[in-house]
Image: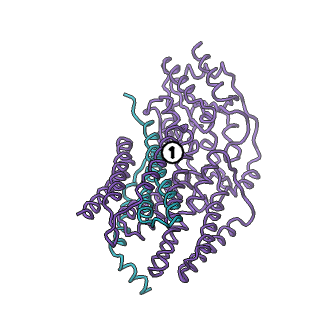
Chain colours: A purple, B cyan
Amino acid sequence: MQSIILWISYIVGSITFIIGLKQLSHPETARRGNLVAAAGMTIAILATMLFYKDENGNHLHNFGWIFGGIIIGSVVGWMAAKRVKMTAMPQMVSLFNGMGGACAAIISIIEYPHMAIMHEWNIVAVTLAGLLIGGTSFAGSMIAFGKLNGNIGDKVFPAQTIINLLLLIATIGVGIYLTLLPDTNMTVLLIMALMTLTYGVMFVLPIGGADMPVVISLLNSFTGVAAACAGFIYQNQIMLTGGILVGSAGTILTILMCRAMNRSLLNVIIGNFGGKAKGAAGEKEKGTVKEISLSDAAVLLSYSKKVMVVPGYGLAVAQAQHTVHELEKTLEDKGVEVKYAIHPVAGRMPGHMNVLLAEADVPYEKLLEMENANDEFPTADAVIVVGANDVVNPAAKTDPSSPIYGMPILDVEQAHNVIVMKRSMNPGYAGIENQLFYEPKTRMLFGDAKATLQKLVSEVKAN
Amino acid sequence: MNDLLNFLFLHKEMVFIIILSVFLGIEVISHVPTVLHTPLMSGANAIHGVVIIGAILVMGSAEPGNYLALILGFLSVILGTLNVVGGFVVTDRMLEMFKKKK
């Protein structure tokens, strides 16, 4: 009877995962979907503790340790997730992903000796796959966390791709050795674990910070597969379902994210902006930029019928989301229609700008996706680009040697006037020149986003 | 090759689940708006925390004297729980920001 209850709870859990994921893909049901999946997870965990019986009919024991571990993990996880700033959310996803990968890897390490003795090579191979994939995901996720947190830079060195590939092959080689000649002496296993961790680090280290979201999504699906490996060796249906669902959905999501940047996954992993040198050697013909004064900008905005705001990472760095909302409200009071154009990869993660602006209570309906925004630019009197650079760089359309070539951008030059707010003429995250700044309709407004916006608000109010 | 097929057939239900789950995973996240990419990734992250069940099984079957299994198992339970709890809470925080203001 107990095994039946357990079986049913695993079915319920798996269903909640499927429904949860489905609901997470629609804005109206997203929050509910998260809770549904969480409920199913809880049911599955509790049922396992209460009703699981192994081949010999034994229940689980060591409940003191188990509960202790769950309590520690819950308290630390809850507090870390609740306390962290919204702008640190992406690295938290990476951190918790790494935890899952490490969990799977440790399970494989503990189970390898049993599998090596009792089972044939196939199960041993799956166990070692769990170690390889989980360990890579753990190490890689930690590096991704560091990069997004600003602690780690991009380390590129010659022949990197080859070295990484050789390291991967060598690690798999050790795995094959351990599969065919199972050795309950843990030394070789630990060597494989260390090689796996090294590979995980080397895999993510050269990839640019701007590409971290794609990498995290990829590592997310890796951890899913690692969880499935663990599920396979325990013949546990819910671990298998949950793991493969995430492995599969995560892979598709990674591909979708790459498409939004119009780059291939391979290019993200290996490319690391090889175009940088070429791009600099390309367009040298620049011209001069024209500046606009605060008062002129205020007049331009106040007497526009429609203004569009293009937020970028600079807005997040300056923490100016509340100030830009104030500007929006001030303009709207004067009868100016204000909308925001959100590029899919503006900021550090898809949705970054949305979260930032939502925190400032900007109404959801004012945020336009790229296609809709591009339809509206021709009828906009003015566009304010706040701390965004690559997403409005025309080189994506005109310069085949540019690293961002082919990426769809926001067509701000279709508007009547463009005001670009930047701290200086320094290149943006991709490190390339932006021809937009030299276009005839563009005016530069230099300064810190928050301070400049604040002054703009006062000037507009005075108009 | 024969070996491999026999192995897969030995675990035929598991293989079946895997194949169906792959297609299911692809299906449930078709047509995701870009703005939901990150919360969805975070939600999926929490779901693969189901690996904690494996950690519980390891811990739950560890022999009293086997300190390596006990300590590593304890660690893996903590890590798995961090994945689950942290994952769902982070996802909820991201989605909280998407409420429409009435």
Which residue is farthest front? B65
Above or below, A237 against B42 in this view is below
Outermost residue to the bottom: B2
- Is A439 displayed left or right of B80 in the figure? right
Mark 1 element type: helix
Tell me: residue A362, above or below residue B48. above
> Alpha-carbon neighbours of circle 1 within 10 Å: few (<14), some, or many (≥20)?
some
Horizontal and vertical percent for residue A336?
50, 22
Question: Which amino acid, by three-letter code, is at mark 1?
Answer: Val
Which residue ends up furthest to the top in the rendered image?
A: A462
In the image, is A258 to the left or to the right of A438?
left
Q: What's the chain of the residue with tag 1?
A: A
- Residue A301 visible somewhere in the drawing: yes
Left or right: A310, with A155 as reference point = left
Kindly tell me whether residue A441 is visible in this rendering. Answer: no
Q: At x 43% / y 82%, what residue is drawn?
A: B4
Residue corresponding to mark 1:
A76
What quarter of the picture does the N terminus of chain A occupy?
A: bottom left
Residue drawn where x is 70% and y is 37% of the image: A438
Q: Quadrant of residue A203?
A: bottom right
Q: Quadrant of the C terminus of chain A?
A: top right
The residue that appears at 37% across and 49% down in the rendered structure is A38
**Pick the front one: B23 or A246:** A246
Query: In which quarter of the view is residue B51 placed?
Result: bottom left
Looking at the image, residue A362 lies above or below residue A259: above
* Percent x, y of residue A10: 31, 60
- x then y, percent, for residue A106: 52, 63
Look at 40% across and 82% down and name the residue there. Answer: B5
For residue A51, side relative to residue A301 (left or right): left
